[in-house]
């Protein structure tokens, strides 16, 4: 690498991220400020809010070539904080960091320890933010059309929630009804033992 090129390949911020697991590694990147800009070497402050990855790539390439800083630069843009959350009736509810920015709902559920026997496989909730609004979609994982659904691949900050089925709700309800009886019985036995002893 030429010495002039090195300055453009030195990111200004270590960011914790990982592959498609919950394990974290330290990747380097540029933090987008609250004003929607980054500090890029030599080019200075660049407004990036509202730009697609392709638009930002084209803009950086144009700036570098117009200023004659590099010839035919190669610019790769990706999100280092791409995360999805899996909750509810799964083996290990978790937040998953995705380094390659692509994960399907089935992969995310698999990483979270798969659905438990109490999960509603035909009614998994996907909560996504679109245009500033929370959108809730119900997905049937038993149907093959899940593979062609626009919600099959998750987006950053998506939340997948596996609802409990009736068996789980009934079991929880039974425990709540039986627990006070058991505690009362134990209290009664403790009282008797203290009086006998």
Image (cartoon, rainbow, N blue to C red):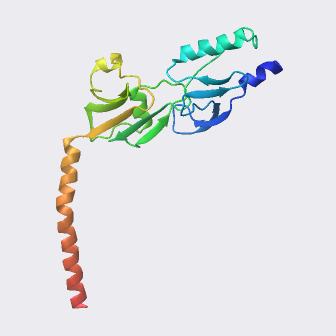
Q: Is residue 185 left or right of residue 65?
A: left
Q: Is residue 47 left or right of residue 155?
A: right
Compared to 177, does 31 lie above or below?
Answer: above
User: Where does residue 156 sit, x and y in percent of width and height?
Assistant: 45, 29
Q: Residue at x 74, y 9 (%)?
A: 71
Most foreground residue, 162 or 110: 162
Image quarter of residue 58? top right
Q: Does residue 1 appear in this view?
A: no
User: Where does residue 13 sit, x and y in percent of width and height?
Assistant: 65, 35
In which quadrant of the rendered image does the N terminus lie? top right
User: Where does residue 122 sit, x and y in percent of width and height?
Assistant: 25, 30
Q: Residue at x 60, y 15 (%)?
A: 57
In which quadrant of the rendered image does the C terminus lie? bottom left
Compared to 189, does 154 lie above or below?
Answer: above
Q: Residue furthest right?
A: 3
Q: Does residue 67 appear in this view?
A: yes
Compared to 50, does 16 lie above or below?
Answer: below
Image quarter of residue 154? top left
Most foreground residue, 153 or 116: 153
Q: Is residue 138 left or right of residue 4?
A: left
Image quarter of residue 131? top left
Task: Give the number of marks.
Answer: 0
Q: Is residue 108 left or right of residue 170?
A: right
Q: Residue at x 70, y 9 (%)?
A: 66
User: Where does residue 141 sit, x and y in percent of width and height?
Assistant: 30, 27
């Amino acid at each position: 690498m030429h010495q002039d090129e090195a300055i453009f390949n030195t990111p200004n911020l270590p960011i914790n991220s990982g592959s498609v697991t919950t394990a974290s590694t330290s990747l380097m990147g540029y933090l987008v400020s609250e004003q929607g800009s980054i500090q890029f070497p030599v080019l200075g402050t660049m407004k990036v809010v509202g730009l697609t990855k392709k638009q930002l790539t084209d803009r950086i390439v144009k700036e570098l070539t117009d200023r004659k800083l590099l010839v035919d630069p190669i610019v790769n843009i990706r999100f280092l904080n791409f995360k999805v959350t899996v909750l509810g009736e799964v083996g290990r509810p978790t937040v998953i960091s995705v380094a390659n920015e692509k994960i399907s709902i089935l992969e995310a559920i698999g990483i979270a320890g798969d659905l438990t026997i109490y999960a509603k496989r035909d009614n998994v909730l996907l909560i996504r933010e679109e245009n500033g609004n929370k959108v809730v979609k119900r997905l049937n994982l038993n149907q093959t059309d899940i593979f062609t659904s626009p919600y099959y691949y998750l987006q950053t900050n998506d939340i997948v929630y596996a609802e409990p089925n009736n068996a789980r709700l009934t079991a929880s309800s039974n425990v709540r009804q039986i627990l006070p009886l058991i505690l009362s019985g134990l209290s009664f036995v403790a009282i008797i033992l203290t009086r006998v002893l």
